[in-house]
């Protein structure tokens, strides 16, 4: 059985190099437009800017994947077609796509392209995955973060498509590709623009007591005291003002996914890749998380029966995670 790959995020050139230098087998990235699901100002690449990154990846004998994983609306398909064309021209090792129409375009125009199904497609059962494989020849699916390890193991017995799962980083409580919270508050859809809580709607308002209100399109997502800090504001992780004036997380407290303790079970379930979330994070985060996952995976392969999580791994992950807690998400059970 081939060793599981580590797939790391690259929101800019510095993060790309940090990922490669820290042990990633491949980086995933996007173009600086609405065709990718991390379309924030200052992130991502023009095709020209990407050329230096590609040269670095190739020099280290690694791979790069291009994410084209949002959903074009009426009359806008040409931008997504152009993104596919650019990814193919740059010889991407894989193109990660969510939309059926864009998959159709990619497969018909580039019959030999390696197509991966994005987590944004929310394909979480083998019938769906096999449909994409039959009609579009996808080689790999990135599973949404809603399945248990036992479900992944069962799924793998019914498909030859490679399975990629998230391992470290932010945890989305909503089924990927199906969230409308940001759309409801701002009118700007995560699924079409590629940005959850677009920065143009975010405001930080200082208070007389030294605290801070964080708003999204004038909706207060968090109210901080002078000694508190907060991750990037999103609706699902908002700490809202209750009717009695107290603050409470209505849906999810800020916490991060950490599968280090379940690496043996995930590998033995038949996965092909572990993915780190965080194209919007710093090169320090990317380098640290890639290094930790590389060490953990190598440790497992060196001694499968004696594998254990080392204290230094836990210390490093907790120091960089969103919020102050970690979770296994749905992997142990729902």
Image (cartoon, rainbow, N blue to C red):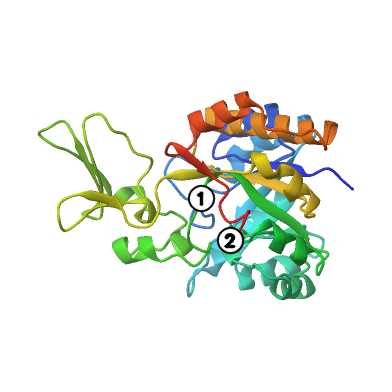
Q: Tell which of 296 and 196 is nearer to you.
A: 296
Of the numbered discs in the image, which one, if any, rests on residue 146? 2
Of 54 and 198, the residue lying toward us = 198
On screen, residue 291 above or below 205: above
Percent across and percent down for residue 182 are 36, 60
Q: Is residue 277 visible?
A: yes
Residue highlighted by disc 1? 171
Decide if residue 127 is on the left or right side of residue 334: right
Provide residue 285's location: percent of width, then percent of height: 54, 31
Q: Is residue 3 left or right of residue 89?
A: right
Q: Nearer the viewer, residue 29 or 166?
A: 166
Which residue appears farthest toward the left when viewing the image?
A: 208
**Secondary structure state at the residue bearing disc 1:** loop
Q: For the residue labelled by badge 2, is the local secondary structure a helix, a strand or a loop?
A: loop
- Residue at 69 percent across and 72 percent down: it is 104
Task: Answer with the quarter of the image where residue 160 lies.
Answer: bottom right
Relative to 296, 111 lies left or right: right
């Amino acid at each position: 059985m081939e060793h599981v790959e580590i797939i790391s995020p690259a929101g800019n050139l510095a993060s790309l190099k940090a990922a490669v230098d820290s042990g990633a087998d491949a980086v995933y990235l996007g173009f600086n437009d609405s065709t990718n699901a991390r379309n924030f100002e200052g992130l991502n690449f023009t095709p020209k800017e990407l050329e230096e990154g590609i040269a670095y990846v190739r020099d280290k004998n690694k791979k790069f994947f291009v994410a084209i994983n949002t959903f074009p609306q009426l009359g806008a398909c040409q931008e997504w077609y152009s993104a596919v064309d650019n990814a193919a021209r740059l010889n991407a090792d894989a193109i990660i796509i969510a939309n059926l129409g864009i998959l159709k375009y990619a497969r018909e125009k580039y019959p030999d392209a390696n197509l991966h199904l994005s987590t944004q497609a929310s394909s979480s059962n083998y019938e769906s995955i096999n449909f994409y494989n039959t009609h579009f020849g996808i080689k790999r699916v990135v599973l949404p973060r809603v399945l248990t390890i036992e479900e992944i193991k069962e799924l793998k017995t019914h498909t030859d498509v490679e399975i990629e799962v998230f391992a470290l980083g932010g945890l989305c409580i909503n089924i990927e590709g199906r969230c409308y919270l940001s759309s409801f508050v701002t009118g700007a859809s995560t699924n079409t623009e590629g940005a959850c809580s677009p920065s143009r709607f975010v405001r930080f308002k200082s208070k007389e007591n030294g605290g801070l209100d964080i708003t999204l399109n004038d909706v207060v997502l968090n109210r901080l005291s002078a000694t508190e800090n907060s991750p990037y504001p999103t609706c699902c992780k908002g700490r809202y003002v209750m009717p009695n004036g107290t603050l409470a997380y209505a849906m999810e407290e800020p916490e991060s996914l950490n599968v280090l303790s379940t690496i043996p079970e995930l590998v033995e379930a038949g996965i092909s890749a572990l993915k780190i979330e965080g194209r919007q994070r710093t090169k320090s985060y990317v380098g640290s998380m890639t290094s930790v996952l590389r060490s953990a995976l190598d440790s497992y392969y060196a001694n499968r029966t004696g594998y254990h999580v080392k204290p230094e791994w836990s210390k490093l992950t907790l120091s960089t995670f969103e919020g102050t807690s970690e979770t296994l998400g749905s992997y142990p059970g729902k």
